[in-house]
Amino acid sequence: MKIYDFPKGPYPTRVRIALAEKDMLSRVEFVMVDLYEGEHKRPEFIAAKNYSGTLPVLELDDGTCIGECTAITEYLDALDGTPKLTGNTPLEKGLIHMMTKRAEIELLDAVSVYFHHGTPGLGPKVELYQNPEWGFRQRDKAVRGMRYFDTVLSRQPYVAGEAFSMADIAVIGGLLFASLVELPVPDECEALRGWYAKMLRRESVRRQPAFSGLPV
Ligand SMILES: N[C@@H](CCC(=O)N[C@@H](CS(=O)(=O)O)C(=O)NCC(=O)O)C(=O)O
């Protein structure tokens, strides 16, 4: 399998963490795609790899391409046994998918919009349209999302309940992106900050290029 990748990117890091959790990194060849050069927006990439023009993309040996971090993680989780990142029971699967989607809507995607519209983003070669007001509104939404996940994590050890899952990985992606755009977690979000410190101690997280150089 190949993954079209941007090693320090928040979304690609989600899939990298999943692969590391499942000890599957050796089964994947990473193909770097240069976002700042706009390689992901080239017609040939959009036509052949991902209509949405985003990373990561999983390409199977038969040429099938799967985009979207959640879909890629669900595929990988179904391929290989343990640990289960997407749930073992219908209830677990439903809650994990819901909280993963909520992490995207309320946090990760909101920070991404702020990055692309409220900052120089990937630069003028790629950011062909920017709406700073929309970017700033999404930045404020992301901070509300941080407060929401702080409330969730004040009641339970992981984002979707009692066990680490794909939903935790999505929130890790959101806080990683927030750190890249210098959007701090509010001081009063103690549960979220404590949970994130715990996540950064996981080998599957700490080893990622996005987190390299962190104090051990
Ligand atoms: N919904 C997609 C979003 C993926 C996404 O936005 N990926 C970023 C990569 S990174 O910013 O995390 O490195 C991207 O391709 N951005 C390029 C662009 O939006 O032009 C997913 O979940 O995979």
Image (spheres, helix red, strand yellow):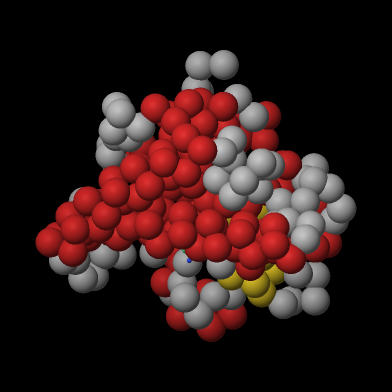
| Horizontal side of residue 23 vs 102, given as left or right | right
63 lies above or below 90 = below
Quarter holding the N terminus is bottom right
Residue at the limit of the structure toward the bottom, as seen here: 47
6, 141: nearer the viewer: 141
At 59% across and 35% down in the image, what residue appears?
Answer: 157
Residue in the image at 87% along x and 53% along y: 81
Inspect this view and state whether residue 138 appears.
yes
**Quadrant hosting residue 207:** top right
Left or right: residue 156 compared with residue 59: left
User: What quarter of the picture does the C terminus occupy?
Assistant: top right
Q: Ligand 1 quadrant?
A: bottom left
Residue 15 coordinates in the image, percent (x, y): 62, 52
One can see residue 121 in this view: no
Does residue 7 sit above or below 57 in this rendering?
above
Q: Nearer the viewer, residue 6 or 160?
A: 160
x and y, in percent, of residue 103 in the image:
46, 55
